[in-house]
Amino acid sequence: MFALSFMRYAFWASTFIAVVAGAVGVFVVARNLSFLTHTLSEIGFAGAAFAVFMGWSALSGMLLFTMASSVMVGQMSTEESRREAVISATSALFIGLGILFLSLSSQTASSATSILFGSVVGISRGEVFQLGGLSCVVVAALGLLYRRLKFSSFDPVGARVNGVGERGVAVIFLLIVALSVSVAAQIVGSLLIFILLTLPAASAKAFTTGVAKMMGLAILFALAGAWTGLYLGYLTNWPVSFFIAVIEVAIYLTALAYHHSQVD
Amino acid sequence: MALAYGDHEIISDLSFELNRGDFLIVIGENGVGKTTLVRALFNQLKPRAGEITFAPGTRLGYVPQFRNLARDYPLSVRDFVALNLPLTLWPWPRRKERAAVDHILAETDLTRLADRPLGLASGGEKQRAYLAQALVVTPQLLVLDESTASLDNEVKYDLLDLVEKFRQAGVTVMFITHDWDLAQRYGTRYLHLTPGGYSTGPIADLPASPKGEE
Ligand SMILES: Nc1ncnc2c1ncn2[C@@H]1O[C@H](COP(=O)(O)OP(=O)(O)OP(=O)(O)O)[C@@H](O)[C@H]1O
Ligand SMILES: [Mg+2]
């Protein structure tokens, strides 16, 4: 299958995405931000629609919209209780804009579905490098922020009294999530992003007790889904996203079963 | 000093002093402002009037009142304690840092539990882990906010004996509680907050129960 250049590109792209989504996902799950990732993917869709309207690349539109909305959410809510409402309001605004731009732009239907559901075939060499670059930025940011992020994600109460700059960390993390969503949307599509950002990490939590180990396992689970999905998609011509979703759900159910067998 | 949330004044005109090696009991009814006082000490609330001064370079450790960890909380006791290591940009723990964490785990009698998930620990074990985490910064002042509220007597006194051990090693302790027996047993000084006032002094002057005050 690697004789085809677009399959090679798809392989590299999905590798980058799995690494980023697995690593970031551990903090998304710890911070109870799964809902936000789902919303960000919708916002990303709106951004892509905006980009189509402007004649830009879908990625740049997604980056613009997801990052802008992350900053808005981060500024408006550090209180957990208020967060969901703020996220809903923000997403309503951006999705409305997305629908508007989609209807205004001329080449609607096909580009919209490729944004929503992802498309392996569409990835070019240049985009692979772009994804690789963005992934490096995400990984580097995670590395530098690791201790703060770990503290404020896994013990917000302790982090607050020990002077971890809460809002700063929260906003930077949301930007990292926005970047990851935009990266992941390229291949799994914006509808399925939250799968890669949440399920591998939630599964990893059942198997180990350290943050670094959780990140490693989550990356492994994400890679397993992405690579197998790509291969099965190649064999059957069915959508890759479908296979990724099924595999990640299967891993998650296994993890839950394992966790219960350990605890009870 | 005076403390307030917006217009809502919680503590007016409080003044007290804490010396090295004290075991200060802060006691008072629910809602009288004990946690608020702690928030001020930790710089999370600016006093409306007055100020709080520490000896230069004083490091503070805090064991908070609420923490609600779920049963599936994933981190091990060791990793939870290690969260409070210095927040450097270098992600991995250095050898010295790992040794420091192991040392504190041993001091708080947690070595045996170090690799178990904290979510599965008992209430007393959790409190010990919280204490250990606060001790990672080797604080000179250790503040515990009702750390014993949900514990059985035996476990409670075990925890306090542990705290007392650190006090004798030179850590100043500020212990917030509703428990008058415990105050008498471990305290050296007290700060009794009442709605609209307070009293403070050596523990011998603290009445044996809240009723004894009138
Ligand atoms: N963020 C806040 N904004 C406004 N009022 C607050 C805030 N936090 C606490 N209060 C009020 O301040 C008062 C003192 O609260 P505090 O938590 O300090 O009491 P406490 O003495 O610690 O009580 P407990 O024994 O129940 O822990 C209460 O009346 C509470 O309602
Ligand atoms: Mg309190």
Image (cartoon, grey):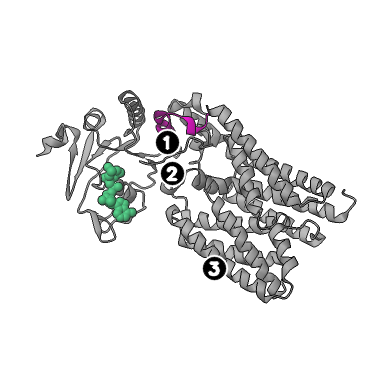
* Badge number at residue B130: 1
The part of the image, by quadrant, that contains residue B124 is: top left
Disc with the residue nearer the chain's start (2 vs 3): 3
**Observer able to see residue A219:** no
The kind of residue tagged 3 is Leu
Kind of residue indicated by mark 2: Gly
Give the x, y percent position of residue B107. Answer: 44, 27
Q: Is residue A260 left or right of residue A159?
A: right
Q: Quadrant of residue A45?
A: bottom right
Q: Residue at x 44, y 40 (%)?
A: B137
Q: Quadrant of the C terminus of chain B?
A: top left
Residue A93: image location, x then y, percent: 54, 68
Question: In the displayed structure, would residue B43 be above or below residue A70?
Answer: above
Mark 3 is surrounded, within 10 Å at the Cα level, by few (under 14), some (14 to 19) or many (20 or more) other residues, namely few
Q: Judge left or right: residue A166 versus residue A18.
A: left
Amino acid tagged 1: Tyr
Task: Output the chain of dot 1.
Answer: B
Q: Quadrant of residue A183?
A: bottom right
Q: Is residue A156 visible?
A: yes
Do tags 3 and 1 sit on the same chain? no
